[in-house]
Image (cartoon, coloured by chain):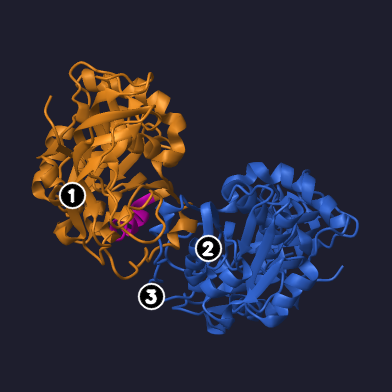
Chain colours: A orange, B blue
Amino acid sequence: MPIRTREWQLAARPHGEPTPDDFRLVELERPDPADGQIVVRMLVMSVDPYMRGRMNAGKSYAARWEIGETMKGGAVGRVIASRSPDVPEGALVLADAAWRDVAVLDAAHVRVLPELPGIPPSYHLGVLGMPGLTAWVGLFRLAEFRAGDAVFVSGAAGAVGSLVGQFARLKGASAVVGSAGTPEKVRWLTEEVGFTRAFDYHDGPVADLLTAAAPDGIDVYFDNVGGEHLEAAIGAFKEFGRAALCGAISGYNATEPVPGPRNMFLMVSKKLSLRGFIVGDHADLRGEFIEQVPPLLTSGQLVVRETVREGLDDAVPAFLDLLRGGNTGKMVVRLAQE
Amino acid sequence: MPIRTREWQLAARPHGEPTPDDFRLVELERPDPADGQIVVRMLVMSVDPYMRGRMNAGKSYAARWEIGETMKGGAVGRVIASRSPDVPEGALVLADAAWRDVAVLDAAHVRVLPELPGIPPSYHLGVLGMPGLTAWVGLFRLAEFRAGDAVFVSGAAGAVGSLVGQFARLKGASAVVGSAGTPEKVRWLTEEVGFTRAFDYHDGPVADLLTAAAPDGIDVYFDNVGGEHLEAAIGAFKEFGRAALCGAISGYNATEPVPGPRNMFLMVSKKLSLRGFIVGDHADLRGEFIEQVPPLLTSGQLVVRETVREGLDDAVPAFLDLLRGGNTGKMVVRLAQE
């Protein structure tokens, strides 16, 4: 008996900011699973800034979405039927397989997740998932964070940024400064998450705000934003400053080339390092990450917040809102209750 | 008996391109050497692009020249009188002590040089000196060059650039591409120095010229120029491309901030690394450098060319000409014959 599903497809490639017309929700019949396949009911799906790149025609680091095909993204689901000995019915799995309510998948393409007491499935899309590992890899490997460093994070109230700041604090940063886009986020960062200082980047030139927040300069910058933020960080770096470049959301919807930092001459005189990265190239750090982070969660040392939207119909509005900074912490879309 | 010397002093800080009026040549009497001091007759002095930074009021990585004081720079000289047991009369020494014909120096501030058969003293200011070590450090440590890499060097006909290309070729580069500022330099690079390809950056947009010269992309970029060259390299990088940022001569005389690369978004998607450096922080590589490079010289595997100017009076015109690209290979000023 074919399986009825509801799935989001890319309808058009956006020029600049995406609109709801670039997407369409369709109802499909999918064939029964073959040998080695499973049927997964999605519980929660991820919307992430990097997905903006998957909408474009050009080459990106993540496989692009094709027009007329179902879009993919990280999701956690429950196996409701299995024709694979490796992934039994009832298992909790992670897959790059939403935006849809039900998926028929090759068992080899999912990862079976542990059932952790007190840890909701959505955490596997955030603090324990790709954003968490991204924060870990960027801070410790790319930016070579060391105890005593002063750290600046842009997009600090986001899924990745809020963890970067906390990992830095827990590992002995001398100061953790964050930028965010609303007064509420700034308050959350300093009052609840434990940032030393935070500022709303709308309040003035970022360089001035950063100088005020980190008057002695910074050693490490974790960049989620690009543009003016990167220029400000280069200006604020002490000697041997190190930046991990994770994203540049300020330019994702740009239709013209975004001007680069005008102070690149400081790269030589201050002996700076800028390193772009994609988490997928650093899977070898997953072991230490998965060993060290869950205890920080269960002991309450990590503050985690999610922005949860309800239902597959809301996935596109959630994504568009994310690109405008409408989230605090990880944004997810809940597709089913258990 | 006091020692009469002729010395160049900084007369004014330039705004933009320096002019001869920013310097003045004075005659001074210097006191006889005290205990622990030596008198050095300078044989040859260095003019280097980095010296432009020493003219500025702001902080630079090299100690700035003060107005009304004698300017300093790398020089090789012969000890003509000594009150130090460590540095005997007759020794060949390297010091940050020209621009002048004779200097009274603390023996602790000079390095005694070996007398190498067939190696002129000026080579200690170039291939065996700071520019040579700069090329070595940037290529092997900062850019993490590996055999098989395709390498691009800007300012390729300069003291540093011409060595970067040759070190890369000798260590197994798949291709070595250079940019320079005249057709003669381009010819020299491909016909005599062994670059795979070279281009004159005046012949079109650097990005187009680089694409034509390295159609398969580049793995390593050694930047002496900055600006448009850096943007072109970022565009031409393959995944995991690595740049060593050594200098940015295109902006040294700029009076307005130079726009940064407009394609910084590629830093993340291509996982690129940009690392600025100053050779002085990497003195630990001097041992392997001094072990490996002289044999390459004596065996004739390294092509070395110098642009030699004659006499202390010509030091300022030589320096101004250097900033306009008037050198091929290392530019030095000969101050005395032996």
Q: Amino acid at mark 3?
A: Glu
Instruction: State which tag comes first along the sequence, 2 or 3.
Output: 2
Toward the front, the furthest residue is: A1
Residue in the image at 37% along x and 65% along y: A260
Report the predominant secondary structure element of the magenta stretch. Answer: helix
Q: Magenta stretch: residue B252 in it?
A: no
Query: Residue placed farthest to the right in the image?
Result: B117
> A246 or B280: nearer the eye?
A246
Question: Which residue is label 3 attached to?
Answer: B256
Pointer 3 with pointer 1, Cβ within 8 A? no
Q: Is A119 situated left or right of B4 in this image? A: left
| Disc 3, SS | loop
Q: Quadrant of residue A45?
A: top left
Residue A114 appears at what percent x and percent y?
29, 19
Please report contact status of discs 2 and 3: CB closer than 8 Å, yes or no.
no
| Tag 3 subunit | B
Q: Nearer the viewer, mark 2 or mark 3?
A: 2
The answer to whether residue B102 is above or below residue B239 is: below
Q: Amino acid at mark 1?
A: Val
Residue sitting nearer the eye, B52 or A27: A27
Which segment did they paint magenta? Answer: A226-237
Screen quadrant of the N terminus of chain A: top left
Q: Tag 1, which secondary structure?
A: strand
Q: Residues within 10 Å of mark 1 (few under 14, many from 20)?
A: few
Where is residue B22 shown, x and y percent of the image?
52, 79
Q: Secondary structure at mark 2?
A: helix
Can you tell which mark lies on residue A26?
A: 1
In front: label 1 or label 2: 1
Give the Cα separation between the discs numbered 3 and 1: 54 Å
